[in-house]
Image: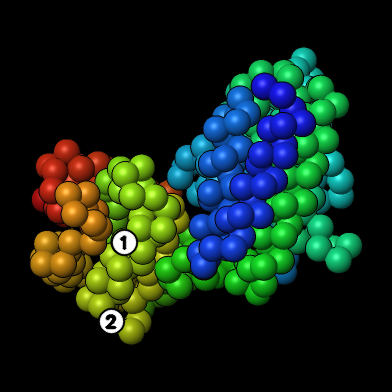
Amino acid sequence: MNPASTREQIGNDFLAYLGKRDSEETQASHFLSVLMDNYPLLSASILTLDKMKKPVVFAHRGLSGSFIKDLYAKGTLPVIDAAISGEVLLPGGDPRLSDPAWRFEHECKALYAAPCRIHGKTAGIFIGEFRDPGLAEPATREAFGAYAQMSAILLALGGEAAGSSEIDTLTGLGTFRAFHDVLHRELPRGKRFGQPVSLMIIKVRFLRELNDVYGHFVADQALVDLSRVVKSQLRGIDHISRSGSSFYIVLPGTPKEKAAALAGRIVSAVNATPPGKQEVVLKVAIGVGAFPADGETERVLIPHVEAMVHESVRRGGNAFTVFGD
């Protein structure tokens, strides 16, 4: 790998992709994919910061859904707090790499983090986790400083949407943090008034295959189409959020039987208008559970519903599974 030519190639690709009519989130995902293809990275992420300086995942490659959920639950991590103020470099052998908070998610050999500054203010954080300790090389460190600034450009182009912790910029649905806030509000309300609260999690299948065959634009459009199909089945009081390839739906005042009927309607709607292109279409695997019968806290209820999602994946096709059935 020639560091100078690699950096120039990535810079040219970045500028060329800015000219396309894609969302800033899609552009950021493409940019991070290019970095993953050209460097020995375990993950690459761009985080934006909400008004309370808490991180929100704007785009990423290599992070797991469970890690993102834990990040939102914790509010922040030491590596993020440090990177708000300035560049963070953890080369091979740094003892902080043995601390999960500092290595971000993976047991990486080196870590780079830097603020994404817009007009002198930190709007977000750029983080890369490396498979080998080569980050100590000055040329690599300099290149990643430039990539952090490219990330800042994407955040600036996103404007208010990029700084929002409530709205997913691709689909217009809520973010995972919004889902967490809604569930945290609705469960105590359900307990107070003696009403059930149902939870539905939808895993979108074959999104990666659609992206590999037809590209980011087609895959993103299919995800948008699917979100519209799902949302069309919901009531005004229901809340739907997206995180990666999953939808999270909170159904206030809804018993599990009615949530199961809703899941059936969603499956029928997706069967009727499968989103995708030609031979690659998206499928949904749905899990359903309810408070308080299936869990009186988020920590109990969510894993139960996620287990039903896995069962629906096992069944294949478009399917839903209800906890306890």
User: In the image, residue 324 lies at what x, y percent?
Assistant: 16, 50
Q: Is 293 situated above or below 309?
A: below
Query: Which numbered disc, 2 or 1, marks the residue closer to the eye?
Result: 1
* Residue drawn at 22 percent across, 49 percent down: 280
Looking at the rendering, which quadrant does residue 194 occupy? Answer: bottom left
Q: Amino acid at mark 1?
A: Ala
Q: Is residue 310 left or right of residue 211?
A: left
Residue 110 found in image quarter? top right
Please determine whether, in this image, residue 96 is positioned above or below residue 252: above
Question: Which quadrant is home to the N terminus?
Answer: top right
Q: Position of residue 54 (x, y in %)?
A: 69, 58
Q: Position of residue 163 (x, y in %)?
A: 66, 67
Please provide percent x and percent y for residue 40.
Answer: 61, 25
Which label is found at residue 222?
1
Asked whether the beta carbons under mark 2 and mark 1 sit within 8 Å of each other, the answer is no
- The amino acid at mark 2 is Arg
Farthest-out residue, bottom = 236
In the displayed image of the protein, which residue is found farthest to the top? Answer: 93
Residue 235: image tag: 2
Q: Residue at x 72, y 37 (%)?
A: 7
* Residue drawn at (68%, 62%) of the image: 155
- Secondary structure at badge 2 equals loop
Find residue 325 and name its label.
none
**Disc 1: CA contacts within 10 A as few (<14), some (14-19) or many (>=20):** many
